[in-house]
Amino acid sequence: MPDPIRFAVLGCGRIGKMHAEMLARQVPNAVVTVVFDVVEAAAQSVAEDLGALVAPSLGDAVSDGEVDAVAICTSTDTHVDAMVAAAAAGKAIFCEKPISLDVAEVDRGLAAVSAAGVKLQIGFNRRFDPSHKAVADAVQHGAVGDVHLCNITSRDPAPPPIDYIRVSGGMFNDMTIHDFDMARYVTGSDVVEVYARGAVRVDSEIGDAGDIDTGVVVLTHASGALTTIDNSRRAAYGYDQRVEAFGNLGKAASDNYHDFNSVLATESGYRRPPLQNFFLERYAQSYLDQWDAFVEYVRSDRASPASGADGRAPLVIAQAAKLSMTENRPVRIADIDFGE
Amino acid sequence: MPDPIRFAVLGCGRIGKMHAEMLARQVPNAVVTVVFDVVEAAAQSVAEDLGALVAPSLGDAVSDGEVDAVAICTSTDTHVDAMVAAAAAGKAIFCEKPISLDVAEVDRGLAAVSAAGVKLQIGFNRRFDPSHKAVADAVQHGAVGDVHLCNITSRDPAPPPIDYIRVSGGMFNDMTIHDFDMARYVTGSDVVEVYARGAVRVDSEIGDAGDIDTGVVVLTHASGALTTIDNSRRAAYGYDQRVEAFGNLGKAASDNYHDFNSVLATESGYRRPPLQNFFLERYAQSYLDQWDAFVEYVRSDRASPASGADGRAPLVIAQAAKLSMTENRPVRIADIDFGE
Amino acid sequence: MPDPIRFAVLGCGRIGKMHAEMLARQVPNAVVTVVFDVVEAAAQSVAEDLGALVAPSLGDAVSDGEVDAVAICTSTDTHVDAMVAAAAAGKAIFCEKPISLDVAEVDRGLAAVSAAGVKLQIGFNRRFDPSHKAVADAVQHGAVGDVHLCNITSRDPAPPPIDYIRVSGGMFNDMTIHDFDMARYVTGSDVVEVYARGAVRVDSEIGDAGDIDTGVVVLTHASGALTTIDNSRRAAYGYDQRVEAFGNLGKAASDNYHDFNSVLATESGYRRPPLQNFFLERYAQSYLDQWDAFVEYVRSDRASPASGADGRAPLVIAQAAKLSMTENRPVRIADIDFGE
Amino acid sequence: MPDPIRFAVLGCGRIGKMHAEMLARQVPNAVVTVVFDVVEAAAQSVAEDLGALVAPSLGDAVSDGEVDAVAICTSTDTHVDAMVAAAAAGKAIFCEKPISLDVAEVDRGLAAVSAAGVKLQIGFNRRFDPSHKAVADAVQHGAVGDVHLCNITSRDPAPPPIDYIRVSGGMFNDMTIHDFDMARYVTGSDVVEVYARGAVRVDSEIGDAGDIDTGVVVLTHASGALTTIDNSRRAAYGYDQRVEAFGNLGKAASDNYHDFNSVLATESGYRRPPLQNFFLERYAQSYLDQWDAFVEYVRSDRASPASGADGRAPLVIAQAAKLSMTENRPVRIADIDFGE
């Protein structure tokens, strides 16, 4: 067995703590050497729990000689600085999504990674969900033939707090961004045009905050495939996440998980429980599989399973969607993206 | 296209009328030439509707020169006489199940068929239900390997009238008989031993009439396969009919049909409608496919898809089941059947 | 029991013959008195089979004193003339969809119906499919709350002959028209704006004929609900027809029917058969229920379950969709429809 | 928040280690204070990992003043001695199943628990599986009415090593014992009679070792309910575990989990992956919920969710099943059990 990969985990909030615990306890060939958080107590608590050290600064964490890889789980606005520092230190990098809400900032981070020649994987965990992954795999193996249509239903069980909504960058950036990534991942083709409609149907407070809570998007891919996405911030029956890829040979589709797997049949019909309704529960396996993929990526010569370009593209699509919705017209990606 | 097979339909009650209409209107290569019923008005009505003639007697019907095949749909106690007459006239015979409740009578009928060398198919329509048939086909094609276990759930939506129960010959003869046939059909192996438990749980009036309404049967097959059957006269959620064959390579299983195919999902869960609950609705396709199979059987050199022996065996198993239940012990078929 | 409704069936092609047979044999309280077809032999054959008379002309058929209702099943371009004649004769009218591909012609027909004060039901049979109807009923009964999103997947098993494609009026008029009706029916709200994308992915010959075979449409309803429709002329796995209505209280969704209802489980997984793939098989029940609804409509004071306005609206939406696709921009219904 | 319950974990093999890790890391209000194993290195490894102490002897572990509860996860033959010691020390006890294969020994253990007045919960984890539990809950809440029938399908993905089979006490004691417990748990009624059939179909080596690998059992409950159980040591398609309770108002049924939740549809049909096939994966949630239930039980005045009597009854049923199979006759529980 090879030496384990030694991680510095940056950010010990909800998601950082989860990643640190997984790496320390559930991921083969991974150890957590140091952790860092701007709130020292948060770092201290995780470090004690996992037998790791607390780094005095982010710079110390990323340049630690006992560290092979850096997991960036800090707040979004600090991702790029951390990425640049980790790249300069020559470490392999895992970065939570989104890299940044500012595409120019994203480009600065990716340029640093590219210049340093280090590895980078973006935290699009849904790519590693076994059910969604099976759809992408079926497409890649040719089981559905050429993809003609892709349908993504993505509905949250409940909207986030209104204070979060205000700083989220809008529903397309905060929620649909996963679906933009999923569309590229599943079809294996870039997006060239976007048409988006949005509405406030769930909660007028969300509208007052300048955002939408209901949306429909049509994507045209470079391959000619067409994707539909429908979103809602509130599905009464739980966390509804389905992806379907349809082609000339058939279709592959992922389905949801119910709270438990039983049925009650009476003269009024058959009844099953609602869907799981917490993303950490629904996507627990995807987070683990994401780390296994990272370890394998760092150890191999393969391409990143969620590259910097994969992290950048959905941000541009989200911008196009916003513009499309505002002006009620289809928007070509080439007309708004001058990057790379 | 060959000349159609010309049928005499004996018996114009509910099931006879259904068969006559199917033969006249929905079965390719079949026509109804004459019909007969002891109630002449019943025969008259069907004949007019279908453009057939009314035979003055059962004997005239079966010996009609314009008739190739006889469909025996009269009351059970007259089946064997009709079979003997039709055999003597050299016609191909379709006979509704059961041939008779008296095994000696059955043997008299089968002997006549055998002596005349005519074709005979028994009306075990469930063999032609596409879902159950797919289970039997999977076994026959080797898809599940050697069959180790077979599970049959067979529950009616509601008990028949108590007057019918009184003359039905008991639940094992009236209802489980389909499952005994299904067990032989699906496993492709004869039954050598039976253990049966019965209870009155649905309606005490059924118990007062000397019958049971709930039962469990274990069958041991010649191949070593074990079958479980569970029966109830009343499933609140509809007509529950499932068959599963399990072997060393896997399993094949049939499932039910709901009233319609929709779901309602709310915060209290997912809801589908109850099951279809009328056997003519549930098994409509099987009746049609049964006729197609009969036409093909008459025209070809193949074996009967539901032979006289197939009609006889379940009656013997039902007798063994009754004895097993009464004495609460397993009963070997060889100990009660001295036939053939 | 009331006197049955006496029908004149106009047109004895595939669909007319099916309707005539259903009316004569399977619909309670309906009889077929006369039939007509421009090909006399076609009319003769149906008439003989059902014991009806052949009318010497369409005019004779609609004005027959022994006729209460007229079923218009002729070719599309003759619907309006037949409707005007039947209205003038004071008969109740059932008219196959589409009324006409020309909205002005539709308006002429509806004006005649209105002037005569006769009843009219358009043949949008999918409204009567029990699974789709359950979705509409759930919405109408408030079970899903306010509708926010509606998703319609509608994929045929195989494209029609290219000669048919050439005269079909294009995919939106020929195929999506059902989905436009479904969107209005299920949401209970008119459409105010359309955005459509089309592509040729299934067969380049379809493109050569000036049509598309793959499409995605977004509809905005007067209520604010958003509908997505995705279409393909060829689904390798069968006839894929699903409708989902999502609102603040949950969702209602219809699903497909497989060829039969069995599963084979082996070490390589669970396998079910493909979907039913002929529309007459998939929608058989809907055609019967459509006639029951017509009989009830004629006998009662209720509104038409598929009125003239319901027949007209999808034609206008289809025009808007065509324009939207051509100019790649959303099109408002009000900008192209100056009717009523 | 109350003080956490402090555990001594006895036995650090596969199952003991799993329990210790869950208690230390995933169960709220639980800590692991000491661990013990006859193989000191095993104890040492777990202790280090979890920050617990290694007890020099089992006696030291159970009498430790810093311990509130003892988890007995040692080999089956040492359970009763450990139980007696823990009872003497006044600790709450969790004991893995089976308590012992010797009913007299079980009675010695239960007597000690009873005399000491300590709490006891047996490790029938499947009672806490959310899907099976929902079936039991539905029965208990009256949703299916009086239970008439109970069907349990329980098939392992692969047989254990032949060396394990030899010391397992036989399939009824080792595997069906879960189903005997499930039948009592789900129906809420004791078993009064057993009929069992067994066969060697999977592997003749199992037969050579004196055991069976395929079985069918019929249980008669005190309530009159009838249970069928079918078992196989090898289901090619994964771990097949289903429970159904049927009564006068309907049925409740649990179903399996597939490896992932996707479908591939092509012209050859719909395909889903096989079932999960490792019991730690299939039942992971049940083990966690079992600990939550234990903590709640220790803290409350409620009855044990899996009492000593619940641990004893399946052992007696297994003896009866063995006798029934050997003599091929139904065996009454009262005829072999003279306990309590």
Image (cartoon, coloured by chain):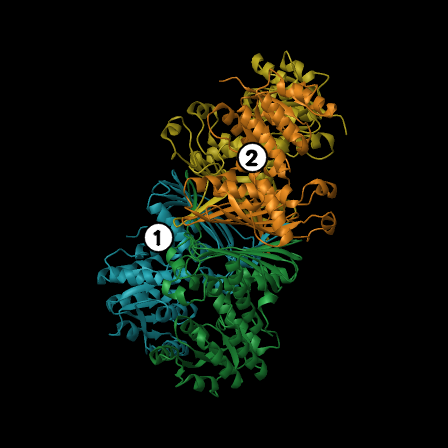
Chain colours: A green, B yellow, C orange, D cyan
Q: Position of residue B17 (x, y in %)?
A: 58, 22
Q: Is residue B19 visible?
A: no
Q: Which mark is residue D313?
A: 1
Q: Label 1 marks which chain's residue?
A: D
How packed mark 1 is, by other alpha carbons closer than 10 Å (few <14, some 14-19, many 20 or more), is some
Q: Label 2 marks which chain's residue?
A: C
Check the image and report above or below for C300 versus C65: below
Amino acid under label 1?
Ala
Q: Position of residue B257 (x, y in %)?
A: 52, 40
Label 2: which secondary element: helix
Q: Position of residue C199 (x, y in %)?
A: 66, 53
Which sits in the foreground, C323 or D28? C323
Left or right: C119, with C199 as reference point? left
Figure quadrant of the C terminus of chain C: top right
Which sits in the foreground, D66 or C305? C305
Amino acid under label 2?
Ser
